[in-house]
Amino acid sequence: EEDEIKSSLIKFLTQLTDNNSNTDPTLGWSMDTDPCIGNWTGVTCDSKLSYVKKIVLDGYNLTGTFDAELLCKAQNLNVLSFNDNKLRGDLSEEIGNCKQLTHLLLSGNQFSGILPDSVSGLNNLKKLEIFNNNFSGKLPNLARISGLVSFLAENNQITGEIPSFDFSNLLFFNVSNNDFTGPVPDIKQFGMSTISGNPGLCGRPMPSACPPSSKKGSKNHSVEHTLMYAGYILIGIIVVVFIAFKLFSKNKTEEVKTDVVKLKGVSVDTSNTKPSMITSEYKISASKTDYSVSAESAMMSSSMIVLSSPVVKGLKFEDLLKAPAELLGRGKHGSLYKIVLEDGIPLVVKRIKDWAISGEDFKRRMQKIDEKKHPNVLPAVAFYSSKQEKLVVYKYQQNGSLFKLIYGTQNGETFDWDSRLHVASKMAEALAFMHKELLADGIAHGNLKSSNVLLNLNMDPCISEYGLMVMDNQDNPSDLLNGNALKMKTKDGAYSTFKVDMYGFGVILLELLTGKLVDNNGLDLAKWVHSVVSEEWTVEVFDKNLVKDGASEERMVSLLQVALKCTNPSPEARPSMHEVASIINTIREEEEASIVSEAW
Ligand SMILES: Nc1ncnc2c1ncn2[C@@H]1O[C@H](COP(=O)(O)OP(=O)(O)OP(=O)(O)O)[C@@H](O)[C@H]1O
């Protein structure tokens, strides 16, 4: 079979080098040698040298017709690059036999005829580049290829409508100077020049408006559409009824519970707490509707420990209860409320759920953490502990979280490479400091993720909720499925959350680099990146906004390598925060040096 592939490839090449001026028209492709070990020009094999993976013959003066049937006998081909030759004729249907193709690059030739339907079946295709040819006719349904990042087809004579791509997934797009007709797609990010030279296009910003029913609308089509719209309307009605119902029943209950304070769920049972913290027995039950301060509750302030923060001197527990509260989030580990004190200071209160830690241990832990101050770690303002309740108070950060910043960029805000690198390096320094200082106490962050990284007024990262999570010491197998719980057993048998932090940090780096959302505690994003990178198409993992802005690929790759080390499934293999911080600093210095040299 190998011989068959070899002879097909050689036959394929002979047809292209017939009248070639090359000194050696065989380009070293010979039956006597192995394509993977012999010197076959332009041929690259997989790492095990078992099959031909790429053929790159750009600018080899190749002429004649491109026999896809012969070529695609090598079924494992990933990359075909024949740019800038003199290839003529049709691209035949058999190109579809190269099922593994990720790159089909044929620009700068004299291909004619239609692009065969089989191209739309190349599911793995990432780049399809056919510009500067004479392709004509309608395109197959290329929108089916979900992973496509580049479609460049300018300077052909292609007709029909522009494929209905999901343009937000494309990095490179150009169909200018063809004969496309139909409506102009939403391609803002690419600019109108990428569709110019297609006089038959209609709708804004073209001079001609699209005819109202430009769709040929066969009967089947219109029936389908009617059904679809009827479905939408039905769903709409259900949603409206549901919301109305909810609102109605909520109004009813609110008549009973007079207060809007969401903290009212807080139940403070002080009967079992240490006498040093609480002087007498008072109970505020969850069902109690009014939290107005009573003389007794003032005494409870003693269990509220206000840390060194000057912002809220003398903050009392009842101040928290009194202030109007807004639920910001309800996570796996508790709820977060925003409150505004009487003097207008906004705070957030984290109410930690199910934390089996004694009041003393909690107090000691919070004070240990508070002793270590770093400008990029958000200090707690106060905390409160009773048997049922653990509350930690922070200052409200009006600039939102890193999570919002990364995913907000889709709405047109920019978060450029320089700023991302800045955030990464500040975070790494802060965590390296905290890890070092708190190593002996075994207090790591425990729940590092981009929503716990806030931005201060200078847009510097501010890591929140440090140390509020303790990993339970049970080896819960279901926990092992999510990345957060990839724990490491230390010598004395305890688990170290420090390596869990490394994983969390790695995922944040991946978010910064890819701009992609994390599912399932980051495991999916990490898995995805690991798989793309192992297939060698590293560049395609990066956020296209970064690529578009011309961020340095070299330094993005360096940061990606750090992220991959941090998200190694095996905790022992992950680096320390100290190592990571120094690598990231080096990357940043290189970035700064390059900006300086560019300025020259
Ligand atoms: N001090 C703060 N100032 C402003 N926003 C904050 C502050 N702390 C957290 N937030 C934001 O409030 C939202 C809810 O926070 P919360 O901590 O409940 O969610 P989470 O981090 O997803 O969950 P968890 O920490 O329980 O795993 C998040 O978007 C977070 O970024």
Image (spheres, rainbow, N blue to C red):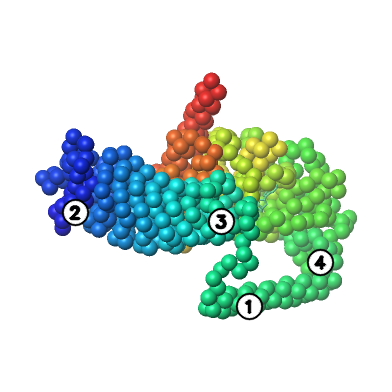
> Is residue 190 in view?
no
Give how far apart the Cα atoms at labels 4 and 3 are: 67 Å
| The one of 206 and 124 positioned closer to us in this rendering | 206
Q: Position of residue 231 (x, y in %)?
A: 61, 76
Q: Residue at x 61, y 61 (%)?
A: 210
Q: Residue at x 21, y 40 (%)?
A: 20
The mark that comes first in sequence, 3 or 2, is 2
The mark that comes first in sequence, 1 or 3, is 3
Q: Residue at x 66, y 38 (%)?
A: 459
The mark that comes first in sequence, 2 or 4, is 2
Q: Quadrant of residue 423?
A: top right
Marks 4 & 1, CB-CB < 8 Å contact = no
Task: Say which element carries label 2.
Answer: helix
| The one of 495 and 198 positioned closer to us in this rendering | 198
Which is more foreground, mark 4 or mark 3? 3
Q: Which residue is mark 2?
A: 8
The mark that comes first in sequence, 1 or 2, is 2
Q: Quadrant of the N terminus?
A: bottom left
Q: Is residue 180 above or below residue 448?
A: below
Q: Which residue is mark 3?
A: 201
The mark that comes first in sequence, 4 or 1, is 1
Q: Which residue is mark 1?
A: 230
The amino acid pointed to by label 4 is Lys
Give how far apart the Cα atoms at labels 4 and 1 are: 48 Å
Q: Residue at x 17, y 37 (%)?
A: 24
Q: Is residue 196 above or below residue 372?
A: below
The amino acid pointed to by label 1 is Ala
